[in-house]
Amino acid sequence: MKKFIVYFLIVFAAVISAQEKETDPNLGKWVPSLVTGLNISQISFSNWAQGGDNSLAFTLMGEFSLKYKTEKWRFKNYVKTAFGKTKLGDADIRQTDNEIYLETVLSLNIGWAVDPFISNSVRTAITDGFDYSKVPAVKIADLFDPGYITQSIGFTYDKSEIIQTRLGIAFQETFTNKLNQYSDDPDTKDKIEDFKFDTGMESVTDAKLKLDDNLLYTTKLRVFTRFQSLDVWDVRWDNAISAKVNSWLNVNLGVILIHEISQTRKTQLKEALQIGIVYRLL
């Protein structure tokens, strides 16, 4: 009887294990995803008595992810880019979106509620960026000027399809070329540094919440603090609500909040409401 029970338990465990594998058809496979979008806004006037000025604006965005999962390992790669410009009347063309973000996370399933992980992320502008509140406009960004690279090691929770979060010890490198105000150490008055290395802690939380059949809310909150100044936090909170009109037309509301005193002591806020074409290639 005991042998029968042991045999039954072994068979039962094997069946359950097989069913778990069957429920995840992507186990052991590379899973790519590529979404591109184009938002365009155009206004033109001719003999218009109520006033106004011609305008043309566009934003080109792209999101690419590549995931690989086994019973033990999870390997996630993510790239997000946004590039946009606008022209109002006879004024010069101005930059409205200008960013690229890359992230790689490798985690190991050890049977706990949280898993150990290592990650690497890269943030930078794609091309020239300007502060148009000043006359003339002042250049404040360029490709890897500044550029931020962050490595982190710690623990992550990613067993939910809705929310994933991770916390770890982080190492952040800041690179500059001509815009050394982002990397310079004010304590060394006789030298201007074009590289800065910070050690601290990083937390990153991603969430996706389906508000309705055609309404999706996504958010990404990243906070970083340095060990030498634990009362100062860099915060980036990226929010988007996407309403799907049909298979290729979306309405998007995006709100980004940034607080990073190396850039400015004021909290930065960006809001964009766009209607545009979205196409999923993969």
Image (tube, rainbow, N blue to C red):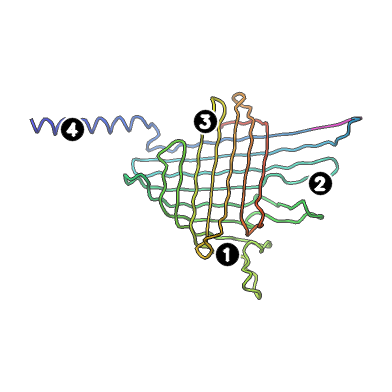
- Give yes or no for residue 26 being in the magenta stretch: no
Q: Name the quadrant containing residue 272.
A: top right
Secondary structure state at the residue bearing disc 2: loop
Cα separation, mark 3 vs mark 2, equals: 40 Å
Q: Earlier in the sequence, mark 3 or mark 2?
A: 2
Residue 196 bears which disc, if any? 1
Q: Amino acid at mark 2?
A: Asp
Cα separation, mark 1 vs mark 2, equals: 34 Å
Q: Amino acid at mark 1?
A: Lys
Q: Marks 1 and 2: which is nearer the front?
A: 1
- Give yes or no for residue 46 being in the magenta stretch: yes
Q: Earlier in the sequence, mark 4 or mark 3?
A: 4
Find the magenta span and give its range: 43-47
Secondary structure state at the residue bearing disc 4: helix
Q: Nearer the viewer, residue 239 or 182?
A: 239
Secondary structure state at the residue bearing disc 1: strand
For disc 3, the marked residue is: 210
- Name the residue: 65% across, 54% down: 143
Cα separation, mark 4 vs mark 3, equals: 39 Å
Q: Vertically, is 213 above or below 97?
A: above
Residue 92 bears which disc, if any? 2
For disc 4, the marked residue is: 9
In contact (CB < 8 Å): disc 4 and disc 3: no
Q: Amino acid at mark 4?
A: Leu
